[in-house]
Image: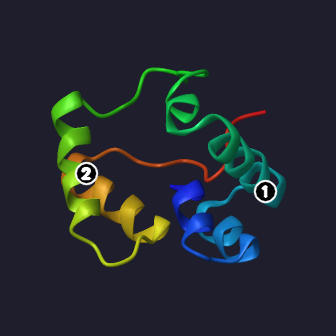
Amino acid sequence: MAVRMALSGKLYYEISQILGVSEFFLGYWKKIFKTQGIERLKLGYKGSQGYLTERQTDVVVEWLKNKEYWNLDELVTYVVQEFGVIYKSKQSPA
């Protein structure tokens, strides 16, 4: 999502505020995308097991696809209301 926003012309500062990530993070992954393509973004760190089921994740993705813009606070509220999953932090744990 961060790379998509950067490629659409959004300023790094705006993206970092919306997603709660550093501007360095944005530059790094945009460079990876431009030099190695979308497949490189799909590989690598897999993270911990999510709190949503595969079906719930699909529902969230469809909900996002139907939005004109994405807002993290709105997404957090949606996930809490629809699935009872509480989002704790905009940043990964250290």
Say whether residue 47 is left or right of residue 82: right
Which sits in the foreground, 41 or 77? 41
Residue 75 position in % (x across, y down): 38, 62
| Image position, residue 42 (x, y; %) | 49, 30
Which part of the image, by quadrant, shows the C terminus? Answer: top right
Q: What is the distance, in whole Å, between disc 2 and disc 1 at their CAs?
A: 24 Å
Q: Residue furthest front?
A: 35
Q: In the rendered view, would you say 46 is above or below 72?
A: above
Residue that label 2 marks: 60
- Number of the label disc, if any, that sits on residue 71: none
Query: x%, y% of residue 45?
Result: 60, 22
For residue 7, which quarter of the picture?
Answer: bottom right
Q: Amino acid at mark 1?
A: Ser
Q: Quadrant of residue 12?
A: bottom right
Asked whether 34 or 70 is in front, the reply is 34
Q: Secondary structure at mark 2?
A: helix
Q: Secondary structure at mark 1?
A: loop
On screen, 14 above or below 62? below
**Identity, as a three-letter code, of the amino acid under mark 2:** Val
Q: Residues within 10 Å of mark 1 (few under 14, many from 20)?
A: some
Residue at 80 percent across and 60 percent down: it is 23
Q: Residue at x 26, y 50 (%)?
A: 61
Q: In the drawing, what numbered circle is on residue 22?
A: 1
**Looking at the image, is mark 2 or mark 1 earlier in the sequence?**
1
Q: Are marks 2 and 1 in contact (CB under 8 Å)?
A: no
* Residue at point 64%, 69% (across, down): 15
